[in-house]
Amino acid sequence: HVLRQIEPMIHTQVHTFNGQNIANTLWAYATMQCKPSPSTLRLFWLIIGEQSSYLFQAPQSISNILWAIAKLDAKPWDSQTPWKQGEEEETASLSMPEDVDEEDYVYFMGAMDALQQAASSKIRELKPQEAANIISAFATLAYWPKFGILDGVEQHIFSNVNYLNMQDIDGVLWAFGALRHEPVYNTTYALERRYISHLQASPSVKAI
């Protein structure tokens, strides 16, 4: 595969990548249905884990990388069952699944922790669609986020619900359900009202 052929070049250049460069590269793999080699994935995870402050200066790159990881299904284990962090989010952890290489697991979890910390600290800077994409990515990966991300995204979405389209709302409600997150009544009501307003504005509904 052509992407496999250029992996040596990726290995030499990845240290110069910014967050969007990483997202675009992972997205290219996903679009072409070609998973990077284990060594290439480890390199991406290492860069994300070690250079998060540089990579995520543009908040958009956080959601783009997470969504690319989700589309690529790049987690190093096969289980699709969402796992909950437990009562103490910051100290709880996922026990390493039996079907995963320990080194792959450590690198991946380091990258995910960096992405989650960046998302948690920059939620207010994200566009509502980007916040929606973040939790949709976690749900697609069957990965329960830490650092209060679900509550933070919910609050951000509630404050900016009028900027969401129908697809965004579908994704948010699906992600909340998949991650077993029960939003507060006000958020659910606001999403429902926004969805209804889109339906009422639809030409097909007006024609009925």
Image (tube, grey):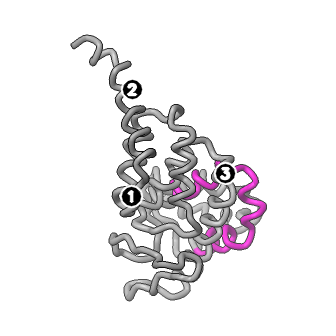
- Residue drawn 53% across and 79% down? 88
Asked whether the beta carbons under mark 3 and mark 2 sit within 8 Å of each other, the answer is: no
Q: CA distance from mark 3 to mark 2?
A: 31 Å
Closer to the chain start, of discs 1 and 2, is 1
Q: Main secondary structure of the magenta part?
A: helix
Front-lying residue, 49 or 124: 124
Magenta range: 42-68
In the image, taking residue 42 as reference, residue 188 lies left or right, namely left
Q: Earlier in the sequence, mark 1 or mark 3?
A: 3
Quadrant for residue 82, please give it.
Answer: bottom left
- Compare marks 3 and 2 and give the one earlier in the sequence: 3
Looking at the image, which residue is at 40% across and 34% down?
166
In the picture provided, is 138 more to the left or to the right than 51?
Answer: left
Residue placed under numbered mark 1 in the picture: 182
Can residue 11 be seen? Answer: yes
Q: Amino acid at mark 2?
A: His
